[in-house]
Image: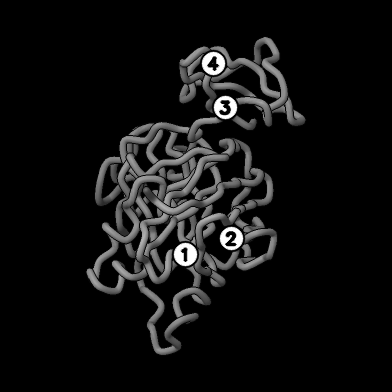
């Protein structure tokens, strides 16, 4: 099932997407939704980030080729590297990424995102899939100047609009071998597969839940493959993940 979150008469609502059409959804996102009346073409709806998380947990350096693409001597991590992005960084499909002025380099990072379906605390890797509602596309926008300067990643990855997500949550997806692509102005920059992840989604849910309790709706961004590249104002960046769809955003200079 593909689930969208959209604006109707100024109110956020959940809907079900089938064959490019959006239908009203009855029920609860985490306990079950049923399809109701048709709203119209999903492309005509005002989409919101597909979920409203209490926190966004992000994983760094989860594809070996990305670990070494800028530094061949960099060691592949032996356990997941965790950082956080604020909820205020969320941006919907179709929204505009605001690039702080004066930056030398701000990159796109195409990522598969895990959406948590129920409270997860210290779960095992074997049980972790039972705590996953579904998956969506994400872009871990990264200000490289501050990432290098600060030595940690919160400021570099925490600006408003630096966490685009969407367009939908796919609840029925085998993520063991799914194609992931990042395109800048139509040119393919990132092209990989989730089979190349160092740490797989179920392991990540278990690992993170043994650090912090994950609440329904929380998101884990699973890391980006090689090919990250800089964006400039006026660009269009697309993140396409097989079985989910395409997250598309434009960019502009921050006022």
Res. 233 mark = none
Q: Nearer the viewer, residue 40 or 74?
A: 40
Residue 203 is situated, as x and y percent measured from the top left of the image, at: 43, 56
Which residue is painted at 31% across and 35% down in the image? 54
Identify residue for label 4. 8
Which residue is painted at 27% across and 41% down in the image? 213
Measured Cα–Cα span from mark 4 to mark 2: 34 Å
Which residue is painted at 41% across and 50% down in the image? 162
Label 2 secondary element: helix
Res. 194 mark = 2
Q: Is residue 14 above or below residue 243?
A: above
Kindly indicate whether the residue at mark 1 contacts the one at mark 3 (C-beta within 8 angstroms). no
Res. 46 mark = 3
The outermost residue toward the left is 150
Determine crowd level at label 3: few under 14, some 14-19, many 20+ residues with C-alpha closer than 10 A: some
Disc nearer the start of the sequence (3/1) = 3
Label 3 secondary element: loop
Disc nearer the start of the sequence (1/2) = 1
Residue 18 is situated, as x and y percent measured from the top left of the image, at: 72, 27
The outermost residue toward the bottom is 73
Scheme of image coloration: one colour
Label 1 secondary element: strand
Identify residue for label 1. 107
Q: Nearer the viewer, residue 77 or 239?
A: 239
Disc nearer the start of the sequence (4/2) = 4
């Amino acid at each position: 099932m593909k689930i969208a979150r959209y604006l109707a008469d100024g109110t956020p609502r959940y809907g079900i997407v089938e064959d490019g059409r959006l239908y009203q959804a009855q029920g609860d996102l985490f306990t079950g939704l049923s399809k109701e009346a048709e709203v119209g073409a999903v492309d005509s709806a005002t989409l919101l980030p597909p979920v409203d998380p209490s926190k966004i947990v992000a994983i760094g350096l989860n594809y070996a080729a990305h670990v070494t693409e800028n530094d061949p001597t960099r060691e592949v991590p032996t356990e997941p590297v965790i950082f956080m992005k604020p909820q205020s960084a969320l941006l919907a499909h179709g929204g505009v990424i605001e690039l702080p002025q004066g930056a030398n380099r701000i990159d796109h990072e195409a990522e598969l995102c895990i959406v948590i379906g129920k409270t997860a605390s210290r779960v095992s890797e074997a049980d972790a899939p039972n705590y996953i509602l579904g998956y969506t596309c994400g872009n871990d926008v990264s200000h490289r100047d501050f990432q290098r300067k600060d030595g940690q990643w919160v400021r570099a990855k925490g600006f408003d609009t630096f966490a685009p997500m969407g367009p939908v949550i796919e609840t029925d997806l085998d993520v063991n071998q799914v194609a992931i692509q990042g395109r800048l102005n139509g040119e393919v920059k990132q092209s990989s597969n989730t089979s190349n992840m160092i740490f797989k989604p179920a392991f990540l849910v278990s690992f993170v839940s043994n650090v912090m309790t994950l609440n329904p709706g929380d998101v884990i961004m699973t890391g980006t493959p090689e090919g990250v590249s800089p964006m400039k104002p006026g660009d269009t960046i697309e993140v396409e993940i097989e079985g989910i769809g395409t997250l598309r955003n434009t960019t502009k200079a921050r006022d």
